[in-house]
Image (cartoon, rainbow, N blue to C red):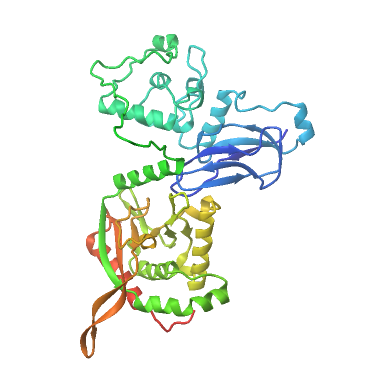
Amino acid sequence: MALVDLVMPKMGESIMEATILKWLKQPGETIKMDETLLEIATDKVDSEVPSTTAGVLDSVLFNVNDVVPVGAVIARINTEATAEASNNNTPTSPTTRQPEAQLADVVSSSPTVHHNYSTESATRPSNGTTKFYSPLVLNIAQSEGVSMGELEQIDGTGNDGRVTKKDILEYVSNKKSGKRGDVQVSTSSVQQYKRPASTETLNVESNEQMVPAKTYSGNVEIIEMDRMRKLIAKHMVDSKHTSPHVTSFTEADVTNLVLWRERVKKDFEKRENEKITFTPLFIEAIVRCIKKYPWLNSSIDGDKLVVKKDINMGMATALPSGNLIVPVIKNADQLNLVGLTKQVNNLASAARNNKLRPDDTSGGTFTLTNVGSFGSLMGTPIINQPQVAILAVGAIKKRPVVIETEQGDSIAIRHMMYLSMSYDHRIIDGALGATFLNAVAKELENFDGNREV
């Protein structure tokens, strides 16, 4: 029997794990090459994982809602079997497959797991009960100095009491803050350990404070966050924790740009079958300035600045659900205005219709967000990690402004727009941030109103 491993695919430099949402095929069913096998979710996008070979699905190694690290084996496909043959041999399901085999598969394929947490101790406590720990949980436990004895005493909130990433991180946090003392576990106590019933509690220090259930007064409605909103919230908090944010502001007279677009948009749509918005025009100006100030197109790795030669422009896009996603235009500096327009429209349409692929949201090096699309004059955006800057454009408004002419100063009605940029103060100082932002404003103000598309 020829078995082919299907691994969790790599979905971008900052994505290290994905959650399984749904298996579309069950063990014993025939699957074709490139046919969708399962649906997964990351902190950026929901997507589908196709089969890398044709055959019969022999086994799946993870259940729905499991968090799986990139590179881990998630399923095996028998390339020699047929659907008829597989019916004569009952395949191994996730519930019957031995946990030792699951862990061995993942440990061998995941570089983040430390092997001094043995397979035997990781999956089977000495009292004979069976518990499975994901490689991610094992890796966190190893790095934080959590012993197997302590790990076995954590009440998991996952399927079948499984310890999740949230559980282990909460335990470590409580342990460091003193809310929970170190659990001293000897060899004999591990052998005698039995999982406590739901009415029992673990022994804790006498000074531990029990946190009361949250109560709400008045007329309120409690709404559970959906999965994407939880991920967005975590991503934003992590970004503020990682980067010291500084925001600079400027304004630009975009009258020439507005009048040019108004003049060419009908002919452009007729010729290219695409509507031209302001977004590709903004991206075009940003790209030109990034080439002059390349540090804005970088990321930080410890004490090193990684300057990216590829300019991959992220554009924050609002979804019908109210959530936000950032599809990425790869190599934006190599596209002309027509190419940028098509990329912007295609990615925006895919986002609205939940058709984005993992690659569509990975690899961004700089992000543009249009806070003006909902009427805001300006904003203080949060950096999209691991980037070092994000630029926001506000609503374009007609205002009376003073303009300088050869005949002297005069007041005229102009199309004005505020620009704001948040940047990582670890590497981008105010001088560079403000210089770059004003360079973008000048690019927009000096737009050639006579240009041809």
Query: Residue lying furthest left in this view?
Result: 408
Q: Is residue 367 above or below residue 137?
A: below
Can residue 142 be seen? no
* Residue 155, image x, y percentages: 42, 21
Question: Which quadrant holds the N terminus?
Answer: top right
Residue 363: give x, y in percent of width and height: 46, 54
Q: Residue furthest front?
A: 219
Q: Is residue 149 above or below residue 115?
A: above
The residue depicted at 31 percent of the width and 46 percent of the height is 242
Residue 444 x/y as whole percent:
35, 74
Indicate the quadrant where residue 197 lies.
Answer: top left
228 or 75, nearer to the observer: 228
Compare residues 56 and 160 and report the one nearer the observer. 160
Can the viewer see residue 397? yes
Foreground: 247 or 97? 247
The furthest residue to the right: 84
| Residue plotted at (58% across, 26% down) | 101
Where is 3 relative to 375, above or below?
above
Where residue 213 sits, quadrant-wise, is top left
Is 303 placed left or right of 308 in the picture? Answer: left
| Front residue (pair 320, 281) | 320
x, y percentage for residue 294? 35, 64
Is 250 located above or below residue 173 in the figure? Answer: below
Q: Which residue occupies 76% across, 29% down?
A: 87
> How many numbered callouts?
0
